[in-house]
Each structure stands twice: as C-alpha cells, then as structure tokens.
C-alpha cells in the first residue's frame, strides 16, 4: 500500500509527465498522452492531456470547465427579474426634492434653507435643508426663531457637529419646537437668527 509521501511523489510525477507530453505536439498532428502511474490503484481515472496540432503553443483541454461556466452564467441570467430595476431619478437629491415647498429664508450663502413651519399634533415642525456647496466636509450651527402672528416666539437649534455634511450633498431635517409655555397662534414665520459654518 503506498504511503502518503509516495502518493505526493506520484502526483508530482504525473504532473511533470503531463507537461512534458503536452509540449511534444507538432504543428501537423496533435499530441495525446495517457498517463497512469503504476503505483496508483487501478480504479484511478487516467490523466488525458491534449494539444492542438495547428497551434504553436500547447493548451490543455478545458472544454468541460468552460461548459460548466457557461451553464452557470445562463442559469444566473435566467433568474434575473424582468423589468427595469432602477427607475426615476438616481442622482443626489437637491433641496427642492424633499417637498418642503419654497424656502422662506437662507443663510451661509444658500447652504442653509428654512421652509414654512407647520403645527402638527401639538408640535411645531420647521423643515430645514443644509447643502454643502464647498469642497470639504462642513459643520453647521443654526438658530431659528419661530414667531406667531400673536407675537409669541420659540427658538430651535440645528447642529451638524457629529458627522457634518459632505461636499455636494444635502441633509434634510425637521426641527421640533415646543410652544406650550407661550403658545403661537395665527400665521407662523421661521427666521434664521444666527448661523455658522466650519470646514474640516
């Protein structure tokens, strides 16, 4: 019974013999060799190596591997759902894409836009978009005062110091304000009272 060391040596011998016999083909007739080492059990499938007769460089036959690869590609192609997987706009959204309406105020050269506030479920909601028009990541701090037609006002704050806003992107948000201490009534107006922008 052959040892594992003998099997390794036999495998290397088979590989070397296959390479040598592959290189023996001529331009007129293909070379074909069947290599079956004597120390392998008789149930081992013989190694067959072929070269093309018209080729100047020998090539091993890989038809079965190519066929399996082609079948797999066809199977994957057939399993792809029909239709258009991507439809509509695929660019980075701009401030007007968020449906907040027309801006009522701006700051930091148009980077910060504030929109018409709304009162919903007892909370004052102030839509804001921050678009970084610069070349570096920017960090914004904004103070917005919300005033009712009755003269009452509340203040809301925006701070993007955790991650900032990357160049060319828009960060939409809605600030919430509580007016239970001084209820706002009538038409609401949002005003940016202070802002800062820092690049890092």
Image (spheres, rainbow, N blue to C red):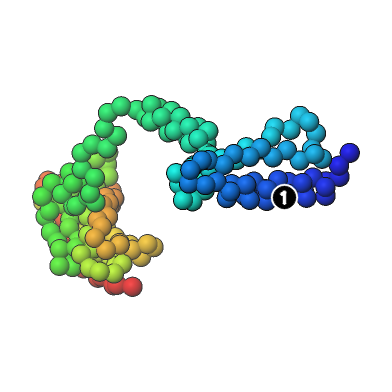
Q: Secondary structure at mark 1?
A: helix
Question: Which of the image's four quarters has the C terminus?
Answer: bottom left
Residue depicted at 69% across the width and 34% down the height: 46
Look at mark 1 in the image and give the residue it sits on. Answer: 12
Residue 90 rendering spot, x and y as whole percentages: 24, 45
Quadrant hosting residue 123? top left
Residue depicted at 26% across the width and 32% down the height: 84
Q: Nearer the viewer, residue 174 or 64?
A: 64
Residue depicted at 34% across the width and 28% down the height: 81
- Most extreme residue toward the front is 28
Residue 185 rendering spot, x and y as whole percentages: 15, 46
Tell me: 102 left or right of 119.
left
Q: Nearer the viewer, residue 78 or 96?
A: 78
Say if 189 sits above or below 67 in the image: below
Question: Which of the image's four quarters has the N terminus?
Answer: top right
> Label 1: few (<14), some or many (≥20) within 10 Å?
few
Say if 29 sits above or below 194 in the image: above
Residue 79 appears in view? yes
């Amino acid at each position: 019974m052959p040892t594992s060391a003998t099997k390794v040596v036999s495998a290397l011998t088979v590989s070397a013999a296959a390479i040598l016999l592959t290189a023996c083909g001529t331009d007129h007739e293909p070379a074909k060799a069947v290599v079956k080492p004597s120390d392998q059990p008789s149930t081992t499938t013989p190694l067959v190596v072929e070269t093309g007769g018209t080729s100047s460089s020998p090539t091993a036959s890989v038809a079965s591997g190519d066929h399996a690869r082609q079948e797999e590609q066809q199977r994957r192609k057939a399993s792809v759902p029909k239709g258009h997987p991507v439809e509509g706009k695929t660019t980075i959204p701009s401030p007007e894409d968020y449906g907040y309406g027309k801006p009522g105020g701006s700051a930091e050269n148009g980077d910060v836009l504030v929109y018409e506030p709304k009162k919903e479920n007892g909370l004052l909601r102030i839509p804001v978009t921050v678009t970084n028009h610069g070349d570096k990541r920017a960090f914004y701090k904004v103070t917005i005062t919300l005033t009712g037609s009755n003269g009452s006002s509340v203040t809301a704050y925006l701070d993007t110091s955790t991650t900032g806003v990357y160049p060319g992107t828009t960060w939409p948000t809605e600030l919430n304000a509580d007016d239970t201490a001084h209820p706002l009534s009538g038409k609401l107006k949002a005003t940016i009272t202070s802002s800062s922008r820092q690049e890092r």
